[in-house]
Structure formats: C-alpha cells, structure tokens
C-alpha cells in the first residue's frame, strides 16, 4: 500500500496543494466560530479524494480551465458537512484521529456548521451558472440523506441483507464520488458517452471505497483508521464482512456472533473472537473479492478514453482504493 500511495501522491501533489489553497480561500465564513469548526473537520488530514477526482475527470475530458480546482471544493465542503452530521448521529467520539467536532464544540454548533458547509457548497455550484450541476449536487445531498436514514433504520438488525447493505453504501458513499466524477465531465463539456463512463467509474470506485473502509473497521488500528476500531459494530452497523460471515456461520458459532453483536459493551476478547469467526466463515475474503470486482468494473469504464496521464492517475486511484486494506 505504501508504494501505491507514495507513487499516487507524487503524481498529484500539485493538484492537492492547489485544492488545499482553494478550500481555505473559498470558505469565507463571517464568524470566527464557523472558521474554527470548519477548520477542525476540513483540515484534519482528509485525503481530498472527491475534489481530486473532479479535477482529474475534467482534465481527462480536455478541460484546461484553471478555476476547476477552485470549483472542486464543492465536493469537499459537502463531504465535510455530512461528516459533521453523521458523527453526531452515530455518537462517534473520534474523526481523523481527533475528537469529533460535536464532542469539542457541542451538538448544536456541529449541526449548524454542517448546514453552513452544505450551503456554501451549493452556493459555489450555483455560481457557475450550470443548472445541471446544481441539480446533481441537490440529488447527491438527497440520496446521501436517505442513505444515512436507511442505515439508521437498519441499525442493530442482524437480518440485514447484502442487498440492503449495498443500497445503503451506494447512497451514503458512492453517489458523492460518482457525482464528483460526473460534475468534472460536465464542467469540461464532455460528450454524454464520456460523462456516463466517468459516472460508472465513480460509482464502482465509491462502492469499493466503502467496502474497504468497512474492512478497515475490523482490521486497522485507531491511528491508521482515524476513528475507533470496532466503532461500526458498537453503533450497531451491519457491514458486508459481518453480514456474509453471519449468514454462513453454523448454529453454535452464529449464536456466539449474535451475542457479541447485540452486546454494545463487548470486550477486546469478544471483538477478537468475533474477528476470528468472521475470517473463518469468509466474511473478510468475500468483501475483498467484491471490492476487487467493483474496482475492475471502474477501471474498465475508462476504456473509452485514450491513454494519457490523467487516465493513468485515475487507474492508480483505483489501485489505491483497493490497496487500503491489503
């Protein structure tokens, strides 16, 4: 993973630096508290994947406008807004290795600053004068909200199906990554064929990204993950590694797994025991295979584009997403 990440970061370091500058310049809050809370979530080490994808997709479609990097912040502002709200809903204590914003600044402040970042994203999007982009941003926001609500309804449900899980991650994660790729194509006035190809790339990349993230919740340590390991389980979230393993487990092991899952105060030993059972029944391997399949589909979607640096970088991004857990 370190080689893939190092190679990718070297290829995009100038773009990332420009995006970082644009995030600060476009924020323009009028209150110091908004600045501090926004900075707490925005500048705590995020990967900037979503605005970077928008820039790369626009460039792949022939866009050479300098303002594309400034415009790309709409994706990161929207992403940060959802993180502020989600952490509060999930009662998460840690985000990107730091105390979650609602823990430090209070629930009301976190919600309102999330609202500000959402509004700022839509305001910048509207400033371009392309109604299609505004519609896409509004649609992303609607779908992400529904995905989070769907996940909230499904919390603690041991019978949650793989199909329901896939619909949740499509809405709450993949549509934003897909939207960034699609907006990049529209910003570049790309053909419908290229726009749809990049939308497909973003969708499958986003699905694989969330699957890898769900694996990391069971396999990484807190320093790497940036949030408490096992947080999804404590919050009652049934993710693919657990859904698959529980479906395949025999009677005694299935009963033990259910007991651990239903006990939100599970111990370190309980967590280790559950992890062993998830590996025994193939939950980890199955999730890896599914993620790899989506990455292959994402890469294949780029076949409509001729070889170039931007295409190569997008292929490298796909490799990075797949290597995050391996």
Image (cartoon, grey):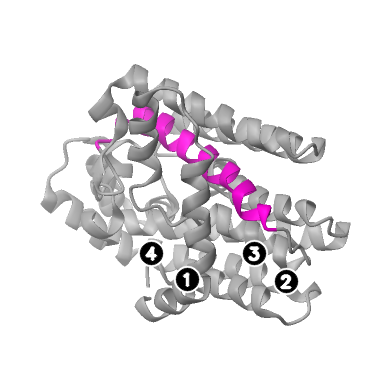
The residue pinned by badge 2 equals: 302
186 vs 219: above or below = above
Do the CB atoms of the residues marked 3 and 4 lie less than 8 Å apart? no
Which dot, 1 or 3, sits closer to the camera? 3
State the residue in front, 222 or 247: 222
Q: Is residue 266 left or right of residue 280?
A: left
Q: Name the residue: 40% across, 67% down.
A: 324
Q: Name the residue: 45% across, 53% down.
A: 240
For marks 2 and 3, give the CA distance: 12 Å
Which residues are drawn in magenta?
66-93
Per the rendering, the mark at residue 320 is 1
The residue pinned by badge 3 equals: 56
For marks 1 and 2, give the CA distance: 16 Å
Q: Is residue 219 left or right of residue 47?
A: left
Residue 253: x percent and y percent?
A: 27, 54
238 vs 245: above or below = above
> Callout 1 environment at 10 Å: few (<14), some (14 to 19), or many (20+)?
many
Secondary structure found at label 1: helix
User: Quick one: quadrant of the N terminus?
Assistant: bottom left
Of mark 1 and mark 4, the one earlier in the sequence is 4
The residue pinned by badge 4 equals: 284
Q: Name the residue: 40% across, 43% down.
A: 42
For marks 1 and 3, give the CA distance: 15 Å
Which dot, 3 or 4, sits closer to the camera? 3
Residue 260: x percent and y percent?
A: 22, 43
Do the CB atoms of the residues marked 1 and 3 lie less than 8 Å apart? no
Of mark 4 and mark 2, the one earlier in the sequence is 4
User: Quick one: quadrant of the C terminus?
Assistant: bottom left
The quarter of the picture where residue 205 lies is bottom right
């Amino acid at each position: 993973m370190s080689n893939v990440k190092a190679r990718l970061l070297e290829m995009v370091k100038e773009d990332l630096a420009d995006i970082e500058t644009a995030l600060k310049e476009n924020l323009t809050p009028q209150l110091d508290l908004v600045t501090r809370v926004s900075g707490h979530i925005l500048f705590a080490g995020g990967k900037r994947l979503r605005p970077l994808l928008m820039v790369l997709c626009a460039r792949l479609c022939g866009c050479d406008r300098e303002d594309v990097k400034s415009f790309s912040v709409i994706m990161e502002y929207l992403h940060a807004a959802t993180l502020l709200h989600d952490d509060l809903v999930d009662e998460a204590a840690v985000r990107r290795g730091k105390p979650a914003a609602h823990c430090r600044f209070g629930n009301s402040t976190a919600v309102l600053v999330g609202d500000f970042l959402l509004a700022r994203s839509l305001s910048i999007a509207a400033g371009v004068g392309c109604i299609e982009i505004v519609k896409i941003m509004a649609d992303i926001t609607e779908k992400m909200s529904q995905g989070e609500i769907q996940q909230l309804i499904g919390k603690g449900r041991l019978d949650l199906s793989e199909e329901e899980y896939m619909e949740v991650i499509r809405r709450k994660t993949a549509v934003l990554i897909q939207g960034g790729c699609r907006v990049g194509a529209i910003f570049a006035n790309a053909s419908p064929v290229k726009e749809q190809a990049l939308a497909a790339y973003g969708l499958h990349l986003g699905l694989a990204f969330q699957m890898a993230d769900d694996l990391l919740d069971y396999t990484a340590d807190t320093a790497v993950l940036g949030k408490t390991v096992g947080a999804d389980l404590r919050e009652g979230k049934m993710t693919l590694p657990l859904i698959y393993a529980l479906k395949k487990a025999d009677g005694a092991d299935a009963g033990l797994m259910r007991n651990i899952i239903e006990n939100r105060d599970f111990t370190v030993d309980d967590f280790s025991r559950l992890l062993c059972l998830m590996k025994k029944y193939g939950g980890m391997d199955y999730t890896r295979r599914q993620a790899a399949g989506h990455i292959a589909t994402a890469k294949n979607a780029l076949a409509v584009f001729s070889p170039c640096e931007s295409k190569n970088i997008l292929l490298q991004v796909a490799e990075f997403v797949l290597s995050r857990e391996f």
